[in-house]
Image (tube, rainbow, N blue to C red):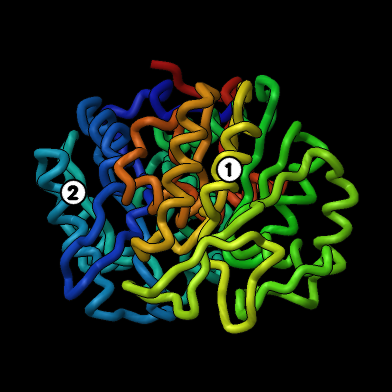
Amino acid sequence: MKASIRTVAVTGKRVLVREDLNVPLTQGRLEDDSRLVACLPTLRDLSERGARVVIASHLGRPAGKPEAGLSLRPVAERLSQLLGLPVGLAQDCVGPAAEAAVAGLEPGQLVLLENVRFHPGEEADEPEFARALADLADVFVNDAFGTSHRAHASVVGVARHLPAYAGDLMLAELEALHRALDQPQRPLVAIVGGAKISSKLGVLSHLLPCVDRLLVVGAMSNTFFLARGLQVGSSLVESDLAQEAREVSDQAGDKLVLPVDAICAEHAEPGAATRVLAVDAIPAGWSILDSGPASAEVFRRSLQGAATVVWNGPPGMFEIAEFRSGTRLLAEAVIASGAYSLVGGGDTDAAVKLLGLSPRFSHVSTGGGATLEYMEGRELPGVAILREADATAEVV
């Protein structure tokens, strides 16, 4: 396990905290502050222990140059409200403006650096840029699990120059993933869905030897249907990957569970006329857009008795009400199983949040792409570079 910043004496020290504050903005207004809420424990603890807290994050894809619409100013304002403490915004993340903002901090105070992606050195992990960020602090904390699959300067480069520890959110994510995937109680059931099988082949390959049952849902199941000789109408399908789907099916054997019926429509739009059809009876011009009621019952039975459930990818276009019931029924089945449940991936996170069911799962990951790569068995550079728990130098 990685060393926690809570074991380190930080009073009076400058602590650079990498958070994932990449929140959706519409005309400068935050649409969802859940990522800000998730980082509060680490920031509040550091402030209460007298650290001079320097927060770094990216926002959007500004292509290495300042972009007014991607300033972190509204994030700083909302973070101040949530913490109940002033959070200043430095006009830059390196250079004189950042140095002055950090120099003016008293113990317990916080400042947010401007968007690190306003500099091309961030995504390129340029040594000079990483060194400039590191010079702002005495200690580094990575609390941004969601960006830890990226070898960027503010994630990995800084950790080459400073003692590097994990924040509370980072540790919570790692502990949940470890419990669900590395040392799961059994039976272990994995639910893998989403739009394309191409984006989940790594997950399927890594999970298949480990799981007791594998539920494949969403549009990616269409490629499995095609591999079995079924017609899928106008549904999204990756015909060039039918052979890969056939190989997964052969390897999985009885572990594999696929939908048996679907909610279909001619157009994926609100108010569309829908039909519930068996997966072997999809007519031309119609698309599979959600799993049907018979599939929900199959999934419910497959989840009964599970001790651990890992879910990445919804079974339908939940954003549209007509194609949301499959996701709701699957979510309720996971909850009813009583298993330790890990929900991972941005779409699945958004789906259970929309349904108001997030609090009923054991852990809903904020990791997005990082969670997906962990599920593929890949090493995350932003995690690997952190100190191990037994390497902590300064204990409180």
Q: Residue at x 41, y 56 (%)?
A: 324
What's the residue type where badge 2 is placed?
Leu
What's the residue type where badge 1 is placed?
Val
Report helix, strand or loop for mark 2. Answer: helix
Q: Which residue is mark 1?
A: 383
As drawn, 143 above or below 286: above
Q: Tell me whether the residue at label 2 lies in contact with that at label 1, contact meaning CB atoms closer than 8 angstroms.
A: no
Are there few (<14), some (14-19), or many (20+) residues within 10 Å of tag 2? many
Q: Which residue is mark 2?
A: 79
State the image coordinates of residue 259 (x, y, percent, origin top left). 64, 52
State the image coordinates of residue 204 (x, y, percent, origin top left). 74, 51
Q: Residue at x 23, y 79 (%)?
A: 68
Asked whether residue 211 appears in the rendered view, the answer is: yes
Q: Which numbered disc covers residue 350?
A: none
Report helix, strand or loop for mark 1. Answer: helix
As drawn, 192 above or below 211: below
